[in-house]
Amino acid sequence: MSEQTHETEHAAESGGHSADPHGAAENHTEESALHIEKWEGIWIRIAVGMTVVFIVAITIAALSFGITVPGATARINPTTLNQEGNPFATPGVRELAPGKYEVYMVAQTWNFVPDRIEVPVGSEVTFYLTARDVIHGVKFAETNVNMMALPGQVSTLKATFDKPGTYNYICHEYCGYVAGAPIGHHTMYGQLIVLPANETAQATTE
Amino acid sequence: MSVTSSYSSQDAREMSNRKLVGLWFSLLAIPLTAIVLFAVLQPIKVTPRIGLAPGFIFTDMNGERLSNEDLRGKMVIYNFTTTSCTTPCVDTSAAMQQMQEMVKRLDTGGIPVMMVTILLDSENATPERMRNYAQRVGADPAVWRIVTGPPDRLKQVVGGGFGLYYEQKDNGVFEFAPLTALVDGNGILRAQYKRGAPEVDFVERDLKLMIDEVQNSAGAGGLVYEAAHLFACYATY
Amino acid sequence: MQSDKAAQSQYGRQQTSLSRILAVAVVLAVLGIIAFVLWRQFGPRPGPQYGIAVNASRPIDDFTLDSTLGRPVALSEFGERYTMLYFGYTTCPDICPTTLADMGKAQTLLGDAADRVQMLFITVDPERDTPERMRDYLAYFGKNIIGLRGSLEETEAVAGQFGVVYQKQFASTSATDYLIDHSSVVLVLDPQRRPLVMFPFGVTAEQMAHDLSAVIR
């Protein structure tokens, strides 16, 4: 018996025709196979496959479709925001041509300048946003305009407003508050009013 | 028992398993790495195709008509200013003079390069004043044309087409944001420089990229350039 | 016994390696097909050979003009389809008819893919061209070319977006006796209204059809 076993083991080591199922060789080969149940193996392969597919999809989307986190487009020195000639020194909405507007917006503690924008319906608005002090963010309700406002960075996004109405925008990056006073991140909001046809655009800060 | 190979079938399965995993891994990793490396290292740089440059018919200082059709086949550097530029206007004249020198000495491989200055103060820009301005900045009409147009067309072309904000204030002074734009020979807007005064080095660099693209994109080279446009640049604004 | 087992296992190993090779081949084939489909759909394309590749990222602004369909038509109406635009006028001596004829012929040459492309003709002569006249004129050239007509300001604004310019050339002192000098380019927009290809004057119908079938996904 022991001789047979010995022979079998010997055969396994020298790599001849081994009749052993893989389990028995574990003690002898240097790297041994990990036994994974069949269904477990399938499940793992599916999970890994999905992960790989999504990573590839994100890479392709970022590199060839330009789908990335919106929309850092420029650097700016936050201490120069009030200098003459800097468009952020006079934030507000400006008309480029009939139907096209640009809005320069500054996010500061704890309000947006401007906090009320009016544009006529159907206009295409390009938003340029920066922060004066800490990190803020802005999200315009019911639109895709959602960006971070970082001091030192100008974020840009374009949106077309086809339906008249009021679109509120809020700060969605926590930026502090004053204890016991009615002001803070939670009171940082504004309104974008899309006017029905034939009215002019303006922006104000109260 | 006979030794036919130096490893057991157990090891053989093990190794072919490994080879298989390696094969699958490389199937996915190689194209992915290639794309990422292409995008990061950018062996071929291109200027993005931002949009179609706006069409215009404007008049120059001698009353002659200049339209974008006349400029087809030429690479054009556009800039925007007024005849009487004081603050808050951005005076780009000095930079444009350097630009003219650069354009004259650039080896363009036969592709014509021109500069066009569009004057925003159309009411003030009489032919006389335009000639004075041209003389002041030393514009060589073979390379640098100075034009203006009717106010509403200017608004459409400059504000709507090039996306530049400008406005005449109550005191008559024009306030405008700085912009220099690069349009290629097919009428496609390829670059926008929004700094105070255009940096001649950047414009030169981008002109060279565009010239290289025109010269090298025949046949298979075209495919590589299309890949560069696809993976290495995109303008989303 | 050992040799039996050995023989059996050798046979078994062959069996296993055969099915393994088969499995690998099947998986590779499936992956290959998927990769091929993705490449065709999203990968860099050779691009138009005869036309000029524009592939701009800035879409054309939507506009609404009067049409030969009897009602105002907006560019965004053709949302799912590619659009092929040409600016001209009905009394144009030879450039417009030849270009329109080429467009119509390209439409026929495309065959089934023609459903994916909508041809549009925008008049640069709104004062003399009426929708009825345009409808009769366009019927000569193609089955489904929609004519669009706006006011003078609208036409100038729309044409300007495409880099198309035009100007009246008066032949005599009569105010209605003029030809129009105009940019003669055919523009192809993708379903998101982004300029895709520009065909300058002189590209034939076969060349247009070839390029169109290359860029239409």
Image (cartoon, coloured by chain):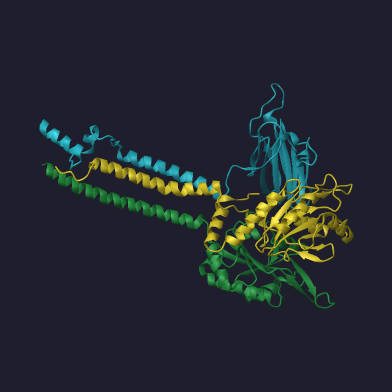
Chain colours: A cyan, B yellow, C green
Residue A145, located in which quarter of the rendered image? Answer: top right
Q: Looking at the image, is A42 positioned above or below residue A185? A: below
Give the mark count.
0
Who's the residue at 33% across and 43% down the image?
A: B18
Q: Quadrant of the N terminus of chain A?
A: top left
Question: Residue A34, image x and y in percent?
Answer: 30, 36
Q: Looking at the image, is C29 positioned above or below residue B18? A: below
Q: Is residue B92 left or right of residue C53?
A: right
Residue farthest toward the front in the current orientation of the protein? B105
Q: Is residue A98 visible?
A: no
Observer-nearest of A65 and B186: B186
Q: Quadrant of the C terminus of chain A?
A: top right
Question: Residue C123, image x and y in percent?
Answer: 71, 69
Residue farthest toward the top in the current orientation of the protein? A180
Question: Residue B69, image x and y in percent?
Answer: 72, 66
Residue B155, located in which quarter of the rendered image? Answer: bottom right
Observer-nearest of C34 and C107: C34
